[in-house]
């Protein structure tokens, strides 16, 4: 049975009985992402406003917390159809995990069918927010 919150958010069926949902942590990630701007395409330069299904992904990744206070999920497999905004969402989540998740020495990996596609996630380095606050290095 899927637990429902008053807002209609459905918890993942993979949430352990010992874990709990921390709305503040989930909202922190959502607010961070929604303060970013799109970096390419027809939405270039516009704020990244998450759709309901995108918020559900972010809420489940960052809001489901183990008893020790850490996220239950440190790996997420998300399958999105063609032209569904996979790269932008992955880049926004990666950027959050790199600079705002509170983990020292965070490492971010991107996997895709080929190296060129995987490297698109790292183009967030072009975002003014990142370039003003952090030294972005590119390695081959």
Image (cartoon, rainbow, N blue to C red):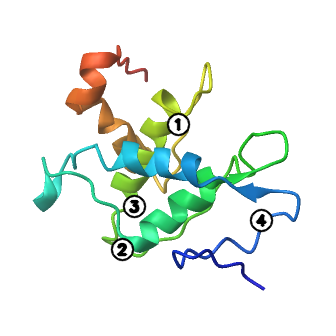
- Closest to the camera, between mark 1 and mark 2, is 1
Q: Is residue 37 visible?
A: yes
On the rendered structure, is 98 left or right of 34? right
Residue at mark 2: 82
Q: Residue at x 76, y 57 (%)?
A: 20
Label 1 sits on a secondary structure element that is helix
Q: Is residue 139 above or below residue 2?
A: above
Q: Is residue 42 above or below residue 66?
A: below
- Closest to the camera, between mark 3 and mark 4, is 4
Label 2 sits on a secondary structure element that is loop
Nearest to N terminus: mark 3 or mark 4? 4
Mark 4 Cα-neighbour bin, 10 Å: few <14, some 14–19, many ≥20:
some
Residue contact between numbered discs 3 and 1, judged by CB atoms under 8 Å: no
As drawn, the label of residue 16 is none
| Image location (x, y in percent) of residue 74 | 69, 46
Question: Gap between marks 3 and 1, in whole Å?
Answer: 16 Å
Residue at mark 3: 86
Considering the image in quadrants, where does the C terminus appear? top left
- Give residue 82's quadrant in the image: bottom left
On the rendered structure, is 49 left or right of 101? left
Residue at mark 1: 97
Nearest to N terminus: mark 3 or mark 1? 3
| Image location (x, y in percent) of residue 12 | 68, 71
Q: Residue at x 46, y 38 (%)?
A: 96
Q: Is residue 116 visible?
A: no
Q: Residue at x 30, y 37 (%)?
A: 123
Q: Nearer the viewer, residue 25 or 82?
A: 25
| Image location (x, y in percent) of residue 69 | 76, 40
Q: Nearer the viewer, residue 20 or 53?
A: 20
As drawn, the label of residue 15 is 4
């Amino acid at each position: 049975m899927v637990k429902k919150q008053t807002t209609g958010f459905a918890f993942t069926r993979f949430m352990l009985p010992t874990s709990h949902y921390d709305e503040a942590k989930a909202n922190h990630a959502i607010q961070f992402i929604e303060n970013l701007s799109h970096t390419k395409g027809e939405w270039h330069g516009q704020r990244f406003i998450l759709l309901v299904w995108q918020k559900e992904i972010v809420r489940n990744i960052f809001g489901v917390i183990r008893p020790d206070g850490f996220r239950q999920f440190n790996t997420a497999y998300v399958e999105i159809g063609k032209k569904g905004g996979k790269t932008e969402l992955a880049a926004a989540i990666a950027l959050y995990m790199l600079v705002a998740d509170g983990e020292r020495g965070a490492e971010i990996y991107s996997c895709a069918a080929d190296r060129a596609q995987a490297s698109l996630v790292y183009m967030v380095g072009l975002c003014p927010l990142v370039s003003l606050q952090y030294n972005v290095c590119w390695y081959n």
